[in-house]
Image (cartoon, rainbow, N blue to C red):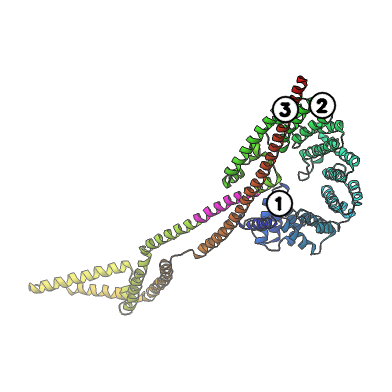
Amino acid sequence: MHKIKAIKTAWLAGLFMFCFPVQGVQSCEQNQLDKAYQEILYFYFQQDFYEALTRFEILNQKCPSSLEKVSNTGVDPLLLKGGISLAYGLEEQAADIFNQLLSQVADDKTQTQAWFLLGKALFQKQQYSQAQATLSKISLDSAQEYLSDYDKDQWIYLQSQLASLQSQVDPEQGLNTQYWLSELSDDSIFRQYVLYNQGLAQLQQGQYNQSVQTLEQLATQQTSFFNDLLQGWWSPLQQIDQTEQDALRDRANLTIGYAHLKNQQALKALEAFNRVRLDSLDTDSAILGYGWAAAQREEYQTALSAWQRLQKVPRSNEYVMESYLASAYAFEQAFAPTQAVDNLQRGLNRFARESQFLRASLNTINDDFFTQLAVNEDWSEEIPAHLSAVMLSKEFRNQMAWLSQSLDLSKQLAAWQSRLDTFSLMLDEREQVTLARAEELKQNDLLGRLAELTATRDALQQQLEQSKKSPQILANEQELEWQTRLERALANHQNIVTKRAELDQKPLNPKYQQRLKRLQGVMVWNAADNLASRSWQAQKVLNDVNLAITKTTAQQGILVTRLNEPPKYQSQRQRIAQLQNELNAKRDANIAVQRMQLDELNSLFASKLNQQLAQLDNYKLQAQLAIVRLNDKAFRKAQADEQGAQR
């Protein structure tokens, strides 16, 4: 059992690291650490210990050894983490944290609280000698100064419990109990536990009168609603449940009743049993005891009234079953053997019916029964009567709590698996989109722009070279228009001269040709005069084109490289693969622990039901023997009456 619990503890603590994304702290700077710790405190005071412990693990994962750097804590972060671990049932982790804290230099307050919580963890691990050695390192003065009233009372209670464990070896340990009682707060719930344990120990040692006196302090104690309200008004963490006090008072009255019954004090036993509430967990036992107390006073009608009321209870437990045998005894003592036999027959029918239910449950209850039960938050309100004994036991409830947490974790892991699948599909979709965009870019005009720029550059270079011999090449648009008109006029003049020569006509006046030559010379001179400035402008344009060619070449190189090597999201896929491996490991661990839990539940259920069946068989045998005895007694009486009549 301890090995399985250790596996569960390691599994639960390790899963904190995976089940939640690391988003509680953005960086390891001081303000971020303080903010993260304040969030932890918020969840702690909301009594959401699971979330608080989860955020502790997130903070430790993001910023290792960061708890020592938190400022203005009010309470040591390691102390708080250990306390939460202890409250959540992680005794091993809590003990490690407290030992780590005590190995460091700490102030008296932190040290006292660490000793207390470590001792509490060791006590819960049933390491009593180590717990006693640890708790004894705290002096009463330190407890009063550095522990809250509730924690101080709990420290005293643990000390008294450890002292009681040694009472069989050293009877003088009983004096220690009185000492602890004197140090406990008057309104402490632990005072009631110490009183009950002291009374029970006295009863086991045969100290009947002292035991009753001790238990009466608890059994007759009345609580005020106003006091209870004020007691838990200021701190929701220390509010004491009134139900716990009532249950403890019922158990004290039940113990007193049976103590009186054992010592032939029937009237006092009736008074004690009568103080047990009718809606208590001890109601059935109290009613059974009440009947035996009445029978001890030979008030058989009162005893039968109590026991027959118990027979009508739908629950199935040893007190209800025993009421049939007890009722038969009362009928027999009241000289009603026929009713006694009838009652025993009803008991046999009830025993057979309960046995049938239990055997059917043994054959039908399986893993699905427990898993369906665990997902139903109100399962405890729908317990079948014949299974109430096992399903209300502490062992069964603890196992169901673990199974419920394991099933919740399975849902979280399944949600994470769905997210990982979605992330993987998103990467596939991005890759397809990237490939489609690459194909589109390959058809883009950007790839053909370089050829256009290169042709433009070559044309400009050719113009600059030719302008050295012919400046008119760099002429502006108006000059080019004039040049075109002049060339057209020269061509027309030459054509006219040729035609007139062919027709033997008189040549044209040479003045017109001379005028055209002058205009041509003026234009050549003008072009030569502006050649320097125009060459500079043309060179500037050429330089711009060369720069554009350089940029375009670089852009095309990058584009071609990306088009030829589309992104594969390798790092993202590696991260998903890593998370998938972790998820598989956690899921396998959860399945293994879940299997152990189900095996324990099946084993516990079978063991408890077999015990009930054995007990029912015992009741059945007692009832059958009683019927045989009553029938034999009736037969002998009939024979005696017949012989007396013959005489």
- Name which residue lies at 71% across and 47% down: 47
User: In this orientation, does residue 71 appear?
Assistant: no
Q: Position of residue 107 (x, y in %)?
A: 83, 60
Question: Residue 451 versus residue 644: which sits nearer the camera?
Answer: 644
Q: Position of residue 450 (x, y in %)?
A: 37, 69
Q: Is residue 472 above or below residue 412?
A: below
Q: In the structure shown, which secondary structural element does the residue marked by tag 3 occupy?
A: helix
In space, the residues marked 2 and 3 are separated at their CA atoms by 27 Å
The disc placed on residue 299 is 2
Q: Earlier in the sequence, mark 2 or mark 3?
A: 2
- Name which residue lies at 32% across and 76% down: 462
Outermost residue on the front side: it is 647
Q: Are marks 1 and 3 in contact (CB under 8 Å)?
A: no
Q: Is residue 256 left or right of residue 374?
A: right
Question: Residue 315 versus residue 627: which sits nearer the camera?
Answer: 627
Type of secondary structure dominating the magenta stretch? helix
Q: Report the amino acid beneath label 1.
A: Tyr
Q: Is residue 32 left or right of residue 128?
A: left
Q: Earlier in the sequence, mark 1 or mark 3?
A: 1
Q: Which residue is mark 1?
A: 88
Q: Which residue is mark 3?
A: 635
Observer-side mark, 2 or 1, equals 2
- Name which residue lies at 65% across and 43% down: 609
Q: Quadrant of residue 282?
A: top right
Observer-side mark, 2 or 3, equals 3
